[in-house]
Image: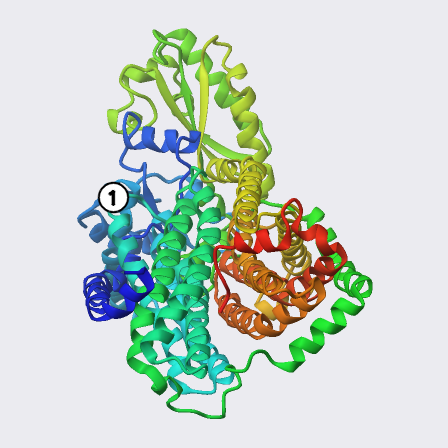
Amino acid sequence: MPIARLIVRRRGWVALAWGAALVTLAPQARHVTDVLEAGARVEGSESVAVERMLSGPLASAYAHFAILVITGAPPPTTAEGAALLRRIVKPLNSTAGVSGTLSWINRPDTLFLPAQGSGTFVVVGLAADPASADRLIPPLRALTEGLSAKLHADYPGLTLRWTGQSPLNVDLRRISGSDVRHAELRALPLTLGLLLLGFGALTAALLPVICGTVAITIALGAAAFFARVLPLSMLLQSVVTMLGLGLGVDYALLMVSRFREALAKGDDPDTAAETATRHAGRTILLSAATVALGLVVMLTVPRSDMRAIAVGGLLVVVASSLLATTLLPGLLAWCGPRIDWGRIRRPDIRKPGPDRWRRWGNLVTRHPWTALAMGTLPLLLLASQATRLRTGQPRGEWLPASMESIRALDDLTAMGRRGLIRIVHVVLELPPGGSIRRSSGWRALSQLAQALEADPRVARVRSVAGLAREAGMGRSAFGFLPDSLLRGLVTPDGRLARLEILPSESATSEELDALVRELRSTGATHTGVPGARVLVGGGPAFNVDYHDAVAGRFRSMASVVVVTTLLALFAGFRSILVPVKAVLLNLLSVASAFGALTVVFQNGHGGRLFGVVEPVGAVYASIPVIVFCIVFGLSMDYEVFLMSRVMEARRRGRNDREAIVEALGTTGRVITSAAAIMLVVFAAFTLGDFLLIKMLGFALAVAVLLDATVVRMVIGPALLQLAGRWNWWPSSPGRAAAGDHGETP
C-alpha cells in the first residue's frame, strides 16, 4: 500500500500516536526553562579548563560567588553602618549553600568602599558548581527581601540587590521565558489573521496554527529530556518557538492548500488527502531536509548555545514536517468539505492561479534585463554594507534593565566597582617538579604578578605573592599564612597558582580581550621559567573563546552548507545552472540581511524602532552563523517550490517563458503567504528585551522578506528567462523534470 494511502487509511492510529507523544511531552515543555542553561560554554577551550581548575585543585570558598549590593545605608566605616552590615551578613552565613562572606567587617579593604558615590557590597561564596549555584539564588533573594522589609522602618532608602553570574543566569531564564510568551502572543493572532485572509475560512486557518503550536510543544518537551544529559542553552526556547511558528504553520499551509485544490477538482476527502500527502508531502520533507542541513552543520561548533540552537531547531523541524505529513492528512480527511467551515469570503485559492501573478510573470519575462537590474542593484547595495559587519561584544547595556541583577550592576557601576563581575583568573602552571614554594617558582609568580600590576588595564591583582608582600614577608609567608587564605590561590604541591585580576573601571571590553590574548601568547615569558604555562579564564577570557570558536569556523561551515546544497539540488533537478543560480541567490539574500543588520544595529540607523537607542558597534559573533545556516535552508524552500512548478510545466510541453509564467501564477500566492507568516513570527521577536534575539529576529525577517519577494519573484524568474534552454544543461528539460522528486502544493 502506498505510504500516502497508508497514512490516510490508518489516521486513527496516527492521531493516537501523536496524542500520546503530546501527553507525554507537554508537561516537560512547561518546565523546560528549569533545565536550560542561561550561560554558554566553549567545550575544550582554555576558559573552561580554568573553570574546572577552580572547581578542582584550586577550589575555594569563593571560587563561585554572588555579590549583594547595598545602597541607602550608612557607610560601613561608621559604627552604625558596621552594625547594620553585621545584621545583614549574619543570616547569610547561616544559609544553606553559602560557603562564606567577604565584606568590610571581615577585612577593612578600600575595595569595599565606593570609589565614587555611596554604598558597599558583600561577596557571598556559593558552595556549588556553576550549574547548581543558580539554584541558591532564589532562597538568598527571599532572605534579603525579608531583611529589607524588617529594616525599612529604620532605613527607608535601603536596597539589597544581587548580581554576579548566578543572579544574572536566574534573571535571564525568567526574562527569556517571558519574552518567548509575549512573542507568541504577538505572532499568533497576526498569523491567524493572515491565514484567514488567504484561506477565507476559519477551519482552514486554524489547522496550521494548531500544527505549529503542537510542534513547538513536542520539540520543547523532547529538548527538556535532552537537557538533562546534554547541557543546552536557554536560546533553544526562542529558536524553537521562532521556527515552530514559522515552519510548522508554513508546512501545514502547503498541505491544506493542496488538499483544498484536490477537493475543488471533485476528489472525495480521502483521495484529496492522499493526493496532498503524495505531492505536498514530498515538498515538505525536501524543504525540511534543506533546513536541517544547516542546523546539522551548526552542531560542529563547540559551544553549548550553538549546540542548543541546532538541537532545538532539528527537533522542531522534524516535528513540524512529520506533523504536516502524517497527522494533518488524517485531520483533513476527517474534515472533508468542512475545511471551509467558518467561511468569511468565497475562497479563490482553488483557482489555478491568481491572474495578478500571471500578469506579473508576463511582465518579468518580457523585460528580463530591466527586472534583473531593478531587483539586483538595490540588493547589491544593501549587501555591500555586510563588508563592514563587525563581530564582538556590543557596546552599551544590552541586557534588560528590568532585571534585578542589572539594577545591582548599575549600583556597582555608580560605586566604581563594576570590575568585580569582570574578574580575570590567571593560572600559573609550573613544569613537572616545579613549585611556588621553591625560590624559582616564587620568583616566577612574583614577576608575573608585578607585570600584571603595572598594566594600566588592571586595577589590582590578588595572589599569594601579593598577600605575602602585604604582610611584609616573602616566600616564608607559607609558614605563617592560614590555609583558609591560601586555599584557591595555590595547590598543596605548589605547582599551580592563581592570580585574580580586577580590571580597571575604564578598561573597555576590547581592551580586556586584548589583555587575555596577550597573556595567553606571552604571559609565560614574564615568569622566566622554561616550560611554565599561563592559562587565562573568567568572563573576558570566555568572550575571547566564544568569538574565536565561531568566527574561526564560519567560512568552513558556510562552504559545507553551500557544497552540500549544490549537490542535493543537482540530484533533484539534473541541472548545473539551476543549483548554481539558487545558491548564488541564497547568498545574495543572506548578504543583504547582514547588510541590513550592519546599518540598523551596528551603525544605529533606525535602531530606535527596535528599542536600541544608540549604535551597538558590533554584532554577536554567533548571529552570522545562525542566520546563514537557517536562512540558507528557508530560502531554498521557495526555490524548490518555484522550480518544481517550472519543471512540471516544461514536462507538459510548455516553453520556458510559458512555464515561468505558469509557475509564478500557481506558487506566487503560496510563497508570499508563507513568507508573510514567517515575517510576522520573526518580527515579533524583535520587540523583546534581549539584544541577541532582536538581532536574530530582525536578520531572519529581512532575509525572508527579500528572498520571497525580490529574489524569487523578480531576480530568479528573470535569470531563468535569460538562460533559456541552458537552465537544463546537461540534461534536456524533459529528463530534468522527470528527475524531480516532488511538487509544490
Q: Is residue 264 above or below residue 530?
A: below
Residue 291 in view here: yes
58 or 130, nearer to the observer: 130
- Name above or below for residue 139 compared with residue 509: below
Characterize the local packing of mark 1: few (<14), some (14-19) or many (20 or more) Cα atoms within 10 angstroms.
few
Residue behind mark 1? 229
The structure residue drawn at horizontal position 41% and vertical position 60%, both measured from the top left corner, is 238
Q: Please name whichever residue, 290 or 548, is drawn nearer the observer in this view of the structure.
A: 290
Q: Taking the image as drawn, is residue 396 in sight?
A: no
**SS class of the residue under badge 1?**
loop
Q: Nearer the viewer, residue 378 or 202?
A: 202
For the N terminus, the image quarter is bottom left
Query: Which percent across, then down, holds residue 179?
Result: 42, 66
How far across and how far down the image is residue 504, in percent? 54, 39
Tell me how the rendering is colored.
Answer: rainbow
- 583 above or below 53? below
Q: Residue 163, image x and y in percent? A: 38, 53
Residues 532 and 329: in front is 329
Quadrant in the picture for residue 107: top left
Q: Residue at x 29, y 43 (%)?
A: 230
| Point 58% across, 59% down: residue | 639
Residue at the far front: name it.
653
How many numbered discs? 1
Instruction: Residue 287: give x, y in percent of width and height.
Output: 47, 57
* Amino acid on which the number 1 mark rests in the picture: Val
